Amino acid sequence: MRIKIWMSGVSGVILLAFAPLGAIEKATVEFQGWGGVNFATKSTYSTDFTGASYIQPTFGLTAWASQPFVLPKELDLGLSAAYMPIFKQTAGTGNVTSVTGFPVLLEARYRFNNGIFAAVGGGYAYTSLKINNETANTNAALLSAKGGYQYDIWNNLSAVATVQLLYALQKLNFPVAGDISNSQLNIGLTLGVAYKI
């Protein structure tokens, strides 16, 4: 009796160990390249730069993995990396003050039947600050929500339009002024191409 129970337990462990291999065979991966425009709101820090431009180009790459054996077939997990200038001001002296983010996000996307999708995620941004042409680096925590439409062009190739809301939580530390919030909302409008393998 004990041998039968032990053999059943071993069989169960083996099935659990090899189940991911079956899952990998059914997995699909989708790669996206995209670009567009980022509209940034003013933070406590950037509000002092009245002549700054808060509309900047942005672009990035996203990879989505779909695995219907473990997850619902409509649900994908993704990783995104982007280049995202937030604001830039050039003074009359020629000195540049700017903030540029390099966000990396982990996301979950739900695909509806009609090509519409919605996604949420979170992550981290390496941020480059240039103040009067002097550069300093810092980081920010990120929260993301996006929605869009994906149109199939032909097998495995599609066009993607996306609206993204990306909130960056960040504090900057200055020797005299102390901590100043640089948290702000970014609204991205992007177009891209996706290829599924």
Image (cartoon, rainbow, N blue to C red):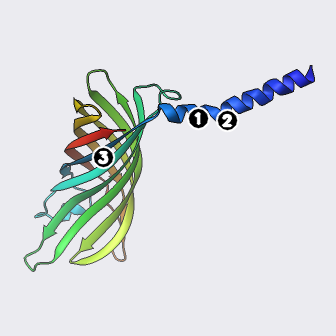
The answer to whether residue 142 is left or right of residue 20 is: left
Q: Which amino acid does label 2 sit on?
A: Ala
**Disc 1 from disc 2: Cα separation:** 7 Å
Q: Which amino acid does label 1 sit on?
A: Pro
Disc number lying in front (3 or 2) = 2
Q: Nearer the viewer, residue 162 or 16?
A: 16
The answer to whether residue 3 is left or right of residue 134 is: right
Residue 170 % position (x, y): 36, 58
Mark 3 lies on residue: 166
Q: Residue 20 carries which label?
A: 1
Q: Which of marks 3 and 2 is nearer the N terminus?
A: 2
Q: Residue furthest right?
A: 1
**Disc 1 from disc 3: Cα separation:** 33 Å
Residue 183 % position (x, y): 32, 55
Q: Is residue 157 visible?
A: yes
Q: Residue 17 carries which label?
A: 2
